[in-house]
Amino acid sequence: METLGIDIGGSAIKGTIVNTETGKYVQERFRIATSQPASMEETVDTVKKLVEHFGWRGKIGCGFPAVVHNGVVKTAANIDKAFIGVNANQLFSEATGCEVNVVNDADAAGFAELNFGKIKNYRGFAIFLTIGTGIGSALFNKGNLIPNSELGHIFMKNGLKGEKFTSDAVRKREDLSWGEWGARFNEYLLYLEKLFYPELFIIGGGTSKKFDKFESALSLNTPIVPATLLNDAGIIGAAMFA
């Protein structure tokens, strides 16, 4: 089955048509840069442009950087706060004329990895993290998703939220070397390790492509691996949820 998958990020919206049985792109990914953060109006308009680019008229799955309950947005850390309380399923469906199903973006990416990536058919307790403008997370136990975990917003002992201490946006803003950033990321992971005692960490998002640059800074007891699907996971997972 072919479905349009869309990944709404903190600085861009991207998507393409996905074969949900194979997890492969049917067409080349299309990306549109946005403001940081984009207003609700800009976000809706950009999603419409992406749908029009593909001439799409079928179902759409949309990964969204927020807690989402049955299509209703509950949080807004890296997006316009006007989204809070909005039924995003209805909002994007009316704007595009298509049936849209909105899901937390990290849940979507982790779900794709569970079905087509590094942790395919994994049945232990795994924490999947996407490192980008913020930090998204997805928890899996015995192959089942525990949705809307939002571990990037856990307060660490230093008083900072995890994503305010060690997101990729922080690395760029503070001009940290990969070694310096890796030390911070290690501190964050050690904190999660003590809280949850997972059997596996999986690192997704664009940072996963640079895993070899900070791997030596990690001192966890828990195995940690880079994701296989990289930046494609969010789009693939969103399409699957549709």
Image (cartoon, grey):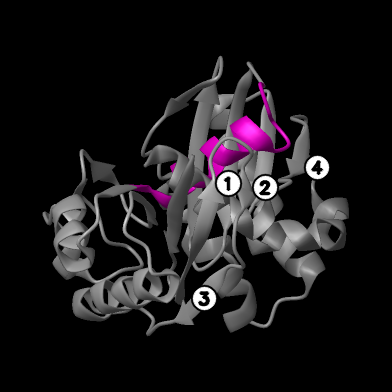
Marks 2 and 4 sit apart, C-alpha to C-alpha, by 15 Å
Question: The residue under label 3 is which amino acid type?
Answer: Arg
**Picture quadrant of residue 196:** top right
Across and down, in percent, residue 174 comes to: 61, 81
| Closer to us: 96 or 14 | 96
Q: Residue at x 44, y 49 (%)?
A: 3
State the separation of the CA atoms marked 2 and 3. Answer: 22 Å
- Pair 4/3: label in front: 3
| Residue carrying label 3 | 31
Q: Is residue 163 left or right of residue 24?
A: left
SS at badge 3: strand
Rendered image: mark on residue 203: 2
Side of 134 where 190 appears, left or right: right
**Helix, strand or loop at mark 1:** strand
Q: Which residues are magenta?
A: 103-121
Cα separation between marks 1 and 3? 22 Å
SS for tag 2? strand
